[in-house]
Structure formats: structure tokens, C-alpha cells
Amino acid sequence: MSVAENYARLRTDGEATLEVGGATYDLPIRKGTLGPDVIDINTLYQDTGCFTYDPGFTSTASCESKITFIDGDKGILLYRGYPIDQLAEHGTFLETCYLLLYGELPTFAQYKEFKERITRHTMVHEQMTRFYTGFRRDAHPMAVMVGVVGALSAFYHDSIDIHDPEQREMASVRMIAKMPTIAAMAYKYSIGQPFIYPKNELDYSANFLHMCFAVPCEDYKVNPVLARAMRRIFILHADHEQNASTSTVRLAGSSGANPFACVSAGIACLWGPAHGGANEAALTMLQEIGSVDRIPEYVERAKDKDDPFRLMGFGHRVYKNYDPRAKIMQKTCHEVLDAVGHGDDPILKVALELERIALSDEYFIEKKLYPNIDFYSGITLKALGFPTDMFTVLFAIARTVGWIAQWKEMIADPMQRIGRPRQLYTGSAERSFVPMDQRQA
């Protein structure tokens, strides 16, 4: 029997039977709290001499986790069991951080202590300001983020020993606290304005907006509607299970790399347009369409399989139902546009009409191309005053706590080993070296 003809049959006794070359192997089936069962192939290569082929690891669980659960078919996203809409509507971002890091929502005393710890660490080492002047003025803010976050390990030597629980905790607090400051400095540098220091009396989201938009020559008061929108955006993006950047952080961390280096690697991965850049692409598409009367043309192009045009912000690799985050983001988008006086924004009108079509047109329904969070977040961030090259930076601020929670969980997992994916080799078989003067052209 060839490898291609091998198969696995699920049995009712909690094992899968695998036949390879006439031999039979029993593989245990593991059950999670929620979600599909998992066939444990941990000893597959050792037992059979074969391993699995799964490009993109879409059918492979790389770890066991208690942090985030997604049911893409039902449109469910849970942080530690709590629905995302409840957290975004009723909680603060630092409550969500505490939940992701420690597994439970904090009591009042726990929240107060955690908030004070974060607040005390929002400033960065003053020498780090010199790092920014080493970048070209027009450097992409994500390039700056990759470099500066990676450089944190050069300044905070007392929190890079991953085997020391206290140092791991200190590194976690520092990164969550300093990421908004580093991001705001990247933004200020890109527009030629002086850095604004954190203000301890402001909450996490309002403080970030203040550092981005305040100037030394006048007072700046954070609009509470915009601060609430920023809070929701941070909560909605805080974690998303084993996505590309989170898997990158875990893979880097599996080698024993310090947490600052791991998060820097996560930022680099997030920079990819297929990951963190999706909201920017969605906004660019809406601006290209421009007006409601041009929508039919673009919808027909999207349906034409021979046309390279794609509607950005629709569908999701995980969600085969309405993205639960998109509902909250749609509401937030309206609130922000009303607050800043853009309630009649033509781009929003295009977005709403596209949404209506997507939810009623048989083509979109059949292919389950529902609007996702990126569809609305790009418009919202633009209305908040951020240029498009800052969109992914804001994503990185929010996702830092998820990366840290996943990294800490990985470090504490006794089953964890250094990541080492296998490959299906299709190159040349072994051959002998030929001297240059004997090689055929």
C-alpha cells in the first residue's frame, strides 16, 4: 500500500487506526473543552517512519492552550471562556490583559494593583530615544517597531532570563506597558513632532491617544468616544488563537530566545499584508471604489474568477460565519464618525452598501464571504486620525498581551520542545560533485 493510500479511521474507543504499508497503528484521540477532537500523532514518525504533510498547518494543533477558543463555523471567539462581545462592551483593556495573562478576570484589588504596575512602566529608557534618530524620517513605523522592541533586551537585562518566573513576569509587564509609548514615538518621529511622555492619570487607551496627538504648545483633551473606540479595538485584537504572528512568537520562544526578541519576531510577522495589513487593504479598496454607484461594477469584478480583483475585508480564513468582532467594530465605527463629524463619510456609505450586498447576495452567502473586522477597522482608524501605515502598529500594541500570554503558557508547558516542522523533500537525489571544467552548459 502506498503512502497516498494510507488512511485513518476514527473508532469509538478513543483511538484512530492508521494503516501504513500493511501495518496497523493505534493513535490516541484527545478531546478539548471545546472544538473538534484531535488525533495525537506525537509518535507517528517514531512508530511508522512517516510524518504528515500539512502546508500552513491548517489541520495541525501545534500546542495545547487554555487562552483563546474560536469556532469559525459558528462565529464564536472566547478569551478564557468569555465571549469577545461581552469583554469589548463592558470591560477595560487592562482587565482583558489580566484575564489573558492569569486566566481569570481580576477583583477590584487585583485590577488596581495590576493597573498601577503597568502605569509605572510606561516610560522607556531615555537613551532609547536616540534609536529613532537612526532611522530615516520616512521609515515605515513597523520597521521602527521591529528594531526598537528587539532592542529592549539591550536595556532591561533583569528580565531576559526565561527560566526565572519573576523575570518572565517583569518582561510581560514591561512590554504591555511600553508598547503604546514605543508606537506613539514611532508615529511622532514619522511626522516630525516631539515625543510626548505618558500621563499617569490617563487610562491605557486614552494615554496612547494623548501620546500620539498632543503637542507641547497646547493642551490636548482626549475625546472619551475616541478613547472608548481605541479600548474596543485593543480588546478585539488582543488575541486570536494560533495565528501566524502568535505561532511565530511561540516558535521563536521554543528556542529559548528572550521575550523581547520573540515579540519583535511577532511584529515582523504581523507586518505581512496577509496578516496585520488587511485593514489597510480594505480601506484602500473602499477608497478605490469611491462611491455607492460604482459598487455594482466592483461586485461583478469580484464574482469574475478571471479578474484578479478581490473584495478586501470579506471572508476569513477561520470564520465561515459573521466575524463576531465585526459587529462590535461596525457599531464603534459609527460612533467615531459621528463624534468627529464624519457621519456622512462617503467611504462609510460604500462600506454599508457592500455589507448589505454581502449579507443578501447569493454569491456571497454561498461562499460565506461575510464582512470581517478589517472591513470596519480601517475606516475607524482613519477617522481617529491615524495614517494607514500606523494601522498595523495599533494591531501590534493590542496583540502584545496575546503574544505574551501565549509565550508564558508555552514556557510553562512540560510538553514543549523546540519547534522543528518537517518537510516533503522534492529536490534532487544524492549526486556527486562535478568540477567546473567538466560541467555541461
Image (cartoon, rainbow, N blue to C red):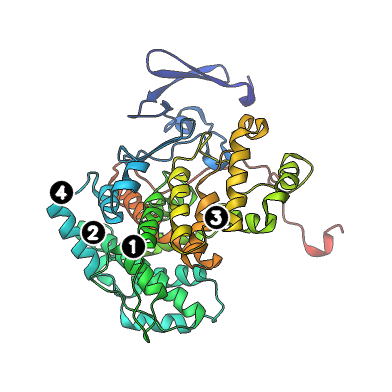
**Extreme left residue here?**
109
Q: Earlier in the sequence, mark 2 or mark 1?
A: 2
What residue sits right under mark 3 in the picture? 279
Residue 311: give x, y in percent of width and height.
65, 47
| Nearest-to-viewer mark from 2 and 3 | 3
| Nearest-to-viewer mark from 3 and 1 | 1
What residue sits right under mark 4 in the picture? 107
Looking at the rendering, in which quadrant would you find the C terminus? bottom right
SS at circle 3: helix
SS at circle 1: helix
Q: Earlier in the sequence, mark 3 or mark 1?
A: 1
| Nearest-to-viewer mark from 2 and 4 | 4
Q: Is residue 313 visible?
A: no
Compared across the picture, whether 33 is left or right of 372 comes to: left
Asked which quadrant contains residue 161, the reply is: bottom left
Residue 316: give x, y in percent of width and height.
55, 41
Residue 412: give x, y in percent of width and height.
27, 47
| Nearest-to-viewer mark from 2 and 1 | 1
**Extreme bottom residue here?**
217
Q: Earlier in the sequence, mark 4 or mark 3?
A: 4
Instruction: Please rate how many residues cluster around mark 3, counting C-alpha atoms within 10 Å: few if below 14, some from 14 to 19, many from 20.
Output: many
Compared across the picture, whether 106 is left or right of 235 comes to: left
Residue 206 vs 195, above or below: the answer is: above
- Tell me the number on the disc at residue 169: 2
Label 3 amino acid?
A: Asn
What residue sits right under mark 1 in the picture? 224
Report how far apart the C-alphas of labels 4 and 3 lie in the structure. Answer: 35 Å
Residue ID at (51%, 78%)? 190
- The answer to whether the residues at label 1 and label 4 have Cβ atoms under 8 Å apart is no
